[in-house]
């Protein structure tokens, strides 16, 4: 849209320059008595009218037809012949309008004209030739600039379409990835005949409704994303023992902030995958703080030796990194600390448009 607006502005400026050249330069290049108003001269008036008829015609004919239809078809000789024909037609009309004006014809009968051996206006006059060349250059340049902006608009549109396609693909990969891990949790409960399984199915239904409906939007309320995370954590807690401690804290203006959906869940999934044990003490700490136009997310978990790990497609975090690059270019900071005992994710997003 920015390029399109710029293209329109440039075209308006070029048209204004062209008309300024056509309307004003005859007062510089054409002959008339400088001691009286220009339009009192019949010779000037006829030349001026011919100019404002022929040169705008040259500008728009060359820009809208000759270049895109003739020159673009590689008919260079035809293009040059048409331009030269237009050029000689313009000079011929001006020459005859000047030569056969009463002003020139009367002057040719004077002794001064005979003494100076003046035989009338020149056919190849500097003024008309200069104006023709200026308008021709401006029209050609205008077409080149317009085509460049059009090409840039197309490139920008293609880039946007590719971006949307890539984001849609990445988002579609998030949902199956999440579903894959969650179904493994429910499967574990079912195998052990746990009475927690029905409740887990209900929670999964709520989660899937969110991933199928809200995640189709480019942005969701942060409060909705937090509800989704809470549902996910509750679902995971179904399979945990008292040895696992899960802390999820939020603060700030969460009711007014909009965020891309499913940005945080891959990091939380990863924490459950590598930081939870049913036999050893383990802890996951998640914090979300919305402060003005800044959003801070932190997810930390201990890496428990021998922890039961859910199967994974391995695409969650890498997809999220790519989505962050596309959705918040140069507006986010992601750091991941990983050592033998602890895994910490810190994400800062600048939400300012």
Image: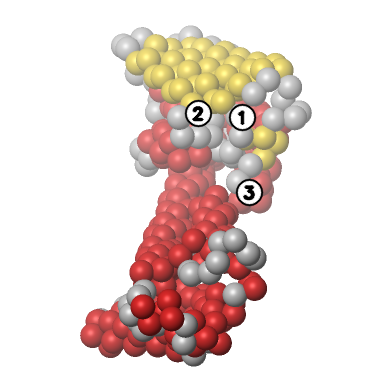
Q: Which of 133 and 331 is in front in this view?
A: 133
Residue identified by numbered label 3: 217
Residue 148: x and y in percent read 39, 60
Location of the C terminus by quadrant is top right
Label 2 secondary element: loop
Q: Is residue 227 left or right of residue 22?
A: right
Label 3 secondary element: loop
**Is any part of residue 158 visible from this angle?**
no
Q: Distance between the residues labelled 2 and 3?
A: 20 Å
Q: Distance between the residues labelled 1 and 2?
A: 8 Å
Q: In the image, which disc is placed on residue 331?
A: 2
Q: Nearer the viewer, residue 200 or 36?
A: 36
Q: In the image, which disc is placed on residue 209?
A: none
| Mark 3: few/some/many CA within 10 Å (<14, 14-19, 20+) | few
Residue 217: x and y in percent read 63, 48
Residue identified by numbered label 1: 352
Residue 23 appears in which quarter of the rendering? Answer: bottom right
| Mark 1: few/some/many CA within 10 Å (<14, 14-19, 20+) | few
Proximity of marks 1 and 2: CB atoms separated by less than 8 Å: yes
Residue 201 appears in which quarter of the rendering? Answer: top right
Residue 287: x and y in percent read 59, 17
Residue 44: x and y in percent read 55, 75
Residue drawn 50% across the image and 34% down it:
328
Proximity of marks 1 and 3: CB atoms separated by less than 8 Å: no
Residue drawn 64% across the image and 73% down it:
40
Residue drawn 66% across the image and 17% down it:
291
The mark nearer the N terminus, 1 or 2, is: 2
């Amino acid at each position: 849209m920015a390029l399109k607006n710029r293209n329109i502005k440039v075209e308006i400026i070029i048209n204004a320059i062209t008309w300024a050249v056509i309307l004003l330069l005859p007062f510089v290049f054409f002959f008339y008595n400088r001691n009286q108003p220009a339009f009192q001269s019949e010779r000037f008036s006829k030349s001026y009218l011919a100019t404002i008829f022929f040169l705008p015609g040259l500008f728009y004919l060359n820009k809208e037809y000759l270049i895109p239809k003739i020159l673009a078809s590689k008919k260079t000789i035809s293009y040059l012949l048409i331009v030269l024909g237009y050029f000689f037609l313009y000079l011929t009309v001006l020459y005859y309008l000047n030569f056969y004006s009463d002003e020139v014809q009367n002057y040719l009968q004077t002794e001064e004209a005979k003494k100076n051996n003046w035989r009338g206006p020149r056919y190849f006059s500097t003024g008309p030739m200069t104006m023709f060349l200026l308008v021709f250059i401006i029209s050609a340049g205008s077409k080149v600039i317009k085509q460049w902006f059009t090409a840039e608009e197309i490139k920008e549109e293609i880039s946007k379409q590719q971006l949307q396609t890539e984001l849609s693909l990445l988002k579609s990969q998030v949902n199956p990835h999440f579903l894959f891990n969650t179904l493994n949790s429910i499967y574990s409960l079912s195998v052990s005949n746990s009475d927690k399984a029905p409740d887990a199915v209900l929670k999964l239904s709520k989660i899937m409704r969110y991933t199928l409906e809200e995640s189709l939007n480019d942005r969701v309320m942060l409060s909705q994303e937090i509800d989704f995370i809470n549902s996910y954590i509750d679902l995971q807690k179904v399979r945990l023992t008292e040895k696992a401690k899960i802390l999820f804290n939020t603060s700030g203006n969460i009711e007014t902030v909009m965020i891309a959906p499913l940005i945080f869940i891959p990091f939380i999934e990863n924490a459950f995958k590598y930081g939870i044990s049913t036999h050893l003490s383990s802890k996951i700490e998640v914090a979300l703080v919305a402060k003005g136009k800044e959003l801070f997310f932190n997810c930390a978990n201990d890496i428990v030796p021998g922890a039961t790990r859910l199967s994974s497609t391995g695409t969650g975090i890498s997809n999220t990194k790519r989505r962050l690059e596309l959705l918040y270019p140069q507006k986010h900071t992601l750091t991941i600390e990983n050592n033998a005992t602890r895994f910490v994710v810190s994400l800062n997003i600048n939400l300012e448009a």
